[in-house]
Image (spheres, grey):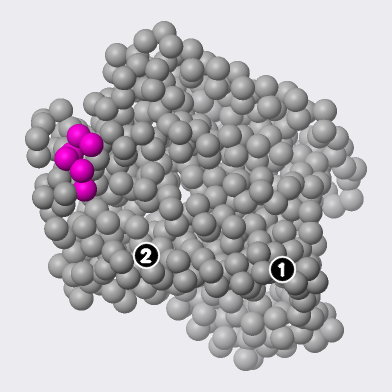
Amino acid sequence: MNLQIIDYLIIVIYFVFVIGIGVLLKRRVKTGNDFLMSNRNIPLWIASLAFISANLGAQEVLGMAANGAKYGMYTTHFYWLGAAFAMIFLGIFMMPFYYGSKARSVPEYLKLRFDEKTRTFNAVSFAAMTVFSSGVSLYALALLMEVILGWDFNVSIWLAAGIVLVYTYLGGLTSAVYNEVLQFFLIVLGILPIVIIGIDRAGGWEGIMQNVDNAKLHLWKGMASPSTNPMGVDAFSLVFGLGFVLAFGYWCTDFLVVQRAMITRNLNEAQRTPIIAAVPKILMPIVVILPGIILLALQKGSDSYALPTDASGSVNYNMALPVMLQNLYPSGILGVGITALIASFMSGMAGNVTAFNTVWTFDIYQSHIRRNASERHYLMVGKATTVVGILISVATAYVARGFNSIMDLLQLVFSFVNAPLFATFFLGMFWKRTTANGAFWGLVSGTAAAALTHGLTVAEGKGGWITNVHEFYSGTSQAFNIAGIAFLVCFIITVLVSLFTRPKKDDELIGLVYSLTPKQTDKAKVWYKNPLWLGITVLVITTILNIIFY
């Protein structure tokens, strides 16, 4: 791209600004709790924006644009089916347990509900997942800098990792949260003009309808069979695999996002955080998916919008958004657009690293290595873990180069970790008979089932490392089905083992199980402060959107 001085200046200002936030917040970070949990003092509106922005990294900005070009409107299912309902459920039913139990992390809740071995298994698997997701964000950023700015891929990785390390190391979780809020506004301001300009270039919505394959302009048509829709999934796999297992597994149990609600000032704000965040979430397809669909329309009239191929000869859909930036943005605005992408990738990486260092410090180090150290000691451990997390992220960034859609890769990772974990949480919170041994062996079995299914199946050349007994139409379909199998295996094994082992006494489960926990009452008597009524409102809007774009 032909960047001018003004474009580079905008990028440099952003880098200086994010580091400055870390420097300013450094004086507030005096204990391990300050560094890792922001002392539970984040305002509601900031927590809500951070909640959605923690997920607004490479997975959404680059990955969803890629899937928009690859699958069309079907990609919107990741929002209207795979996010909104789960976010509402988290706010209404699950946050009272997370926040009320005073757990500092999701694995710590598992320890309170079950036992130490269940907590440790989840902590280790989650830590691995977060640094892998962080590496995906880092890979996407380095790819962007290589293609758009002409920077060396390796130099880009180390530069981005260094900047994230500086502001996270200085300001901890609070620095990451405030940068996530900044990132949210940068994304909207930097990418929304692509949609406006792109629709105009395509001849309005009518031009898009005429030039994009009709199969990619619907949500539910063609879902009777994987062979009759671009996503390569059937309705059952979509609803069960994505809408239930992956959606609830991610939004309700992934500490990366749950942490943003746990650091608010009180339980009511913790409950409202994911529900309020669901409002901009259901509108985000306009910003992150529509550019990929517009690209399909523009390709009919110009070769300059053609997507490059990767080393294997497959179309590299990850380049959808960079190609749109290159063709539609003039100098100045181009700098804002590139800065928005850089912000999303760096913030996504920082979010994963801060979740990683919290889980490692509280759930692994404090639990198994040094239990009764000072707050200052845990502060130093948290900072050291941040450095280690960044270095591991750099390593995993190179693994991500083998996938032509980073969204497919991330869904696969989630199917290994979050899918069985949701079965454990679902049973643990709503069935008091669930035992510690049942939860542990259910998690182990579910994760093993995911690995086995991946080893026996193939999609787009991935998997089948044991043998190939079935080939899926797409990587997305493979991830959805692996998630469903992992959930069911974990659910069944947990129930069976629980029936033959001794549960905890009822008085040990107060505040941890739904039937044994006193119900919250709305003291304010104002509907917009009541999580239930807020959730119903968002639910109605989401349902209407699914009907309109059927």
**The stretch drawn in magenta includes residue 290:** no
- What residue sits 66% from the left and 45% below the top? 46
Residue segment shown in magenta: 200-205
x and y, in percent, of residue 31 in the image: 85, 39
- What residue sits 55% from the left and 72% below the top? 536
Residue 381 appears in the picture as rendered: yes
Toward the viewer: 385 or 101? 101
Secondary structure beneath disc 1? Answer: loop
**The stretch drawn in magenta includes residue 204:** yes
- What residue sits 39% from the left and 38% below the top? 192
Mark carried by residue 526: 1
As drawn, is 157 to the left or to the right of 400?
right
Mark carried by residue 349: none
Observer-side mark, 2 or 1, equals 1
x and y, in percent, of residue 311 in the image: 21, 34
As drawn, is 464 to the left or to the right of 192?
left
Residue 90 appears in the picture as rendered: no
Picture layout, residue 448 above or below residue 442: above
